[in-house]
Each structure stands twice: as C-alpha cells, then as structure tokens.
Amino acid sequence: MKLIAGLGNPGSRYQYSRHNMGFLVLDRLAETGGIALNQTKFEACFGRGIIAGHPALLIKPQSYMNLSGEAVRKFFDYFRIEIKDVIVVHDDLDLPFGTIRLKAGGGPGGHKGLISVIDHVGSADFSRVRLGIGKPDRREMVEGYVLSSFSPDETSQLPRVVGKAAEMLTEMLSTGIESAMCKYHGKTINNFNEEV
C-alpha cells in the first residue's frame, strides 16, 4: 500500500494559505481518484482507494505542520507500510510559484513538516512532491509569508498547479518516480510552458 501524506494546517483560516499546498493537492488527488477523505484516525483525515492500480492511503494530518510526523508515523506503523511506499506532498520556499518537483529522499531543507516526518519515521528515504510557493524578500518574513493567502494572480493559477501536481503523483504511482521525473522535469522554469 502507498501512503500519501499531504502537509498543511487544519481549519478554514489556513485553507488557502501557501503552507497548505499539500492539503490542496491531496484533495484534488482524492477527487480525481474517487476517494472520500471523510474518515478520521490518529489525528488525521484520511481515505483509502486505488490510484493507478495501487492501493493508496491518503492522509491529511490535523495536528498542525510542525507535528505532522506524529500522524504519519501512526499510519506508517498501523498499516505496516515500507518507507519506499511513502510520498509526502508539501510546499517549498526554494521553488518559484507554479514549479513542481519530484524528489526521492533528501534532507528537510528547513521545512518543519518534513523535519517532523523524518524525526518520527526515522528515515528521510521517502519520496516527495515539492510545490513552489516562492519566498519573501527577507528571511524574518518567512513565518508570516507561508501562512498568508495567495496573491490574486497565484489564486487564478492555483487550480492548474494543483491539477498538474495530482497528475504527476498519479504518474509516480503508475510508472515509478524515476520515470515520472524524466517525463516532467524538462528544461522549464515551471511545469507548464515558460522555458528557461
């Protein structure tokens, strides 16, 4: 079984904040896969279904970003999932808005949700879907920035970005991360049509 965790913060206040890209993509993946995220367990909303022929468990931890790993670990243990079958979907300050990158393993890059997941599962060897949100001008503005809403221009692009990320996730499950990376990581500044 694949465990796909979208990271974010619970509540309507944060629903469309930059830090909730993981939640938004998981909602879209659940919608396209016909999976209802209407169950609760281990301080998370979750649903089970089949995506690209694979049994998949979709979870949205509800304990706030910096504690995300607690729920991930409980599902990880309860369903006896291997680390290679874990995918974490999260926002990324180091990528411009609209850029989506797949990654196999690696460090947390300062992301508190990833730090929590790595600490709790005891490994960084899981796959990630990184969703660019850009970054503020000054480092001290980061906390407020990630919790802020998207700009009007970003909001207009959001459905396309979220849809593309869900498509890439499905491709990962269908053909594997290496193949999906080859397919989507071309010479583009984002995953649409702006060339470098």
Image (cartoon, helix red, strand yellow):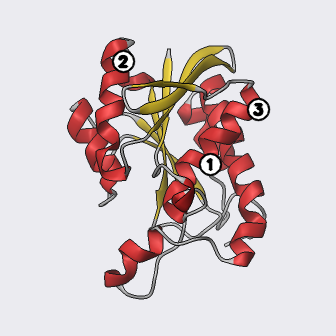
Mark 3: secondary structure: helix
Percent across and percent down for residue 9 are 45, 52
Q: CA distance from mark 2 to mark 1?
A: 25 Å
Badge 2: few (under 14), some or many (20 or more) residues near its Cα, within 10 Å?
Answer: few
**Amino acid at dot 2:** Glu
Percent across and percent down for residue 96 are 57, 70
Badge 3: few (under 14), some or many (20 or more) residues near its Cα, within 10 Å?
Answer: some
Disc 3 designates what residue?
32
Determine if residue 47 is in view: yes
Cβ atoms under marks 3 and 2 closer than 8 Å: no
Q: CA distance from mark 3 to mark 1?
A: 13 Å
Determine if residue 131 is in view: no
Which sits earlier in the primary sequence, circle 3 or circle 1?
1
Which sits earlier in the primary sequence, circle 3 or circle 2?
3
Mark 1: secondary structure: helix
Badge 1: few (under 14), some or many (20 or more) residues near its Cα, within 10 Å?
Answer: many
**Amino acid at dot 3:** Thr
Mark 2: secondary structure: loop
Disc 2 designates what residue?
82
Quarter location, residue 122: top left
Q: Quadrant of the C terminus?
A: bottom right
**Amino acid at dot 1:** Leu
Percent across and percent down for residue 169 are 62, 36
| Mark in front: 2 vs 1 | 1
Disc 1 designates what residue?
24
Q: Which residue is at a point 44% across and 32% down the rendered structure image?
A: 44
Left of 157 or right of it: where is 173? left
Percent across and percent down for residue 148 are 52, 72
Q: Which residue is at a point 47% across and 61% down the rendered structure image?
A: 92
Nearer to the camera, 77 or 67: 67
Give above or below for 128 relative to 187. Answer: above
